[in-house]
Image: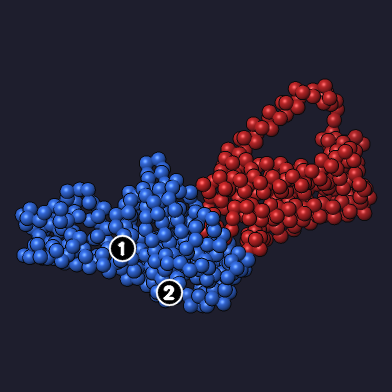
Amino acid sequence: MKGLLYKEYYLNRRLIMMELTGVIAMAGFLILVLLSFRYGNLRFLEEGTRMDFFQMALLSAKYFPIFSFASMAAPPEAVLSEINGKWERFRLSTPVTSWKFASVKSLFQIILLAIGLTCSLLFLGILSVFGFTDFDRNAVVGTLFVFGALLLFTTFFQMLTLFFRSLDKAGVALSVILTFLLVGVFVLAADKLPLGQDMSLSAPGLALEQKAGACLPVALLMIAAAPLLNLIGMGTLLRRREK
Amino acid sequence: MCEFENAIEIKDLTKKYDGFTLDHISFHVPKGTIMGFIGQNGAGKTTTIKAILNIIKADSGSIQLLGRDWIENEAEVKEYMAAVFDELPFHDKFTANALNIMFKGMYHNWSEETFFTYLDRFQLPRKKQIGKLSKGMKMKLQIATALSHGARLLIMDEATTGLDPVVRSEMLDVFREYIQDENNSILMSSHITSDLEKIADSVTFIDKGQILLSGNKDELLERHALIKCTREELKQIAETDYISVRVSDFGAEVMVTDREAAGKKYPGFLIEGTTLEEIMLFYVNKGKKEFT
């Protein structure tokens, strides 16, 4: 277990450092953008537009570290190339079971996402110091919800990739599933959708934060479910593939 | 590890694919010996090795490794065996130092000291990425890792193929040393029969998914012989006495399985010793009346 975990770290250490550096650089840039709304040229924008852009910039600033690390935490291409590669043949001749292999991948996914979540919460704190947002329950729950949703989404994509053993096929399958899902939501709940209303792009994010209380259990459920799904899915698919 | 007589014991191993069947394979590798596993491309060597390593599931048959049922004791058996493949299976980004840390966390019996001793002996760099090593160095690194966790059984699939004679000779020396410990055994699949002639104790030939021949190497080489004759003389040799016949512009060569009997039965003929490569060649062409 320790050996496999070290392998994951060793193979990803440069990427993690690059990601962290990128997050810090981007955080600095986004703070400058947000400050520009207060002191720079962006304060001269027309009131409505300024508010819209400000909210969008603020949402990006809050959630981009999670997006960064979530995409890294379930890298289907890397997992696929490892499973299809020579390493896998070798791995099968070592005392590493498929379940152990899958659980280490899941554990590493959790570690990466925890780094992303910590970065996001830290950044949220910094933004609150500048007075751009409140570091309150709603903001934290909103962050957790986005974190959980992304985690689940990337895990699902990873499962699809392993199932089809192809990134392209998984991409097509995901597009089809999402299309059906969107059409389904549209057909079943058309009357509840804010269709025809003038809505800014940041509205869903703001709505999410307003409903933070209700979102918390869902967020926690998604965060717990993703690594578990990853473990069960990957373990099962690997076992099936071996035979 | 429990006491055992045979490091590998395979009985009636069968695996069916579309267009190829591994057909009731049975052989054993006695403890403390090296077995050469020979056959042409597509004969079933790698499929057999994959089944032994439990990479593929056999349709039927039993595999015992180190005296234990392989399937039921997979984790334990894997601690005491090592597989060496034709290509380095590790990630290119790794260095020897990183491999050491990884395997320390993977094998209970990993010996850092043994690993670094092999690295020094093979003059392998510790901090250079594996992807930047030559083919020979990669193979040496694979052998070093295979021999550093107290493996009692080494399974090699075309491990020395593509290596230059100097590196191959160095590797054969390492295998000879390894086998000095009578608890250690090697199954070595290879196209390079000359290497097996140098180090193998026994040999198993496989062709079209079937075992053609399996036994002590020296006995096989002693027993088999080539009768060299003209095409006219060939007519005097009974078809039941030989495996197959190779014909050329200069005459014919007949592979017989009992050199002594052939010498008595055909006293006027030139009878010469043979090699594993020739034995393989004649057995593969067994069904044909003649081949060139």
Colour basis: by chain
* Gap in angstroms between the C-alphas marked 1 and 2: 19 Å
Name which residue lies at 59% across and 41% down: A163
* Residue highlighted by disc 2: B182
Q: Would you say B281 lies left or right of B170 here?
A: left
Q: Name the chain letter of the residue that bears numbered label 1.
A: B
Indicate left or right for B132 with A221 as reference: left
Q: Which chain is red?
A: A
Badge 1 element = strand
Residue picked out by circle 1: B215
Q: Amino acid at mark 2?
A: Glu
The quadrant where residue A221 appears: top right
| Residue nearest the observer in this picture, B130 or B89 | B89
Can you tell which mark lies on residue A40?
Answer: none
In the depicted view, which residue is nearer to us: B17 or A122? B17
Chain B tint as drawn: blue
Chain on which label 2 sits: B
- Left or right of A38, for residue B162: left
Position of residue B74 measured from the top left corner of the image (x, y, whole percent): 54, 58
The residue depicted at 36 percent of the width and 48 percent of the height is: B23
Is residue B172 positioned above or below A173 on the image?
below
- What residue lies at 40% left-to-right and 54% top-to-bottom? B11
Instruction: Report x, y in % for residue B34.
Output: 38, 68
Residue B184 point in image, percent of width and height: 45, 70
The kind of residue on which mark 1 rests is Gly
The residue carrying pointer 2 sits among few (fewer than 14), some (14 to 19) or many (20 or more) residues within 10 Å by Cα, namely few
Whichever of callouts 1 and 2 sits on the residue coming sooner in the sequence is 2
Eyeballing the image, is A157 above or below A110? Answer: above
Which residue is pictured at 70% across the width and 55% down the height? Answer: A107
Q: SS for tag 2?
A: loop
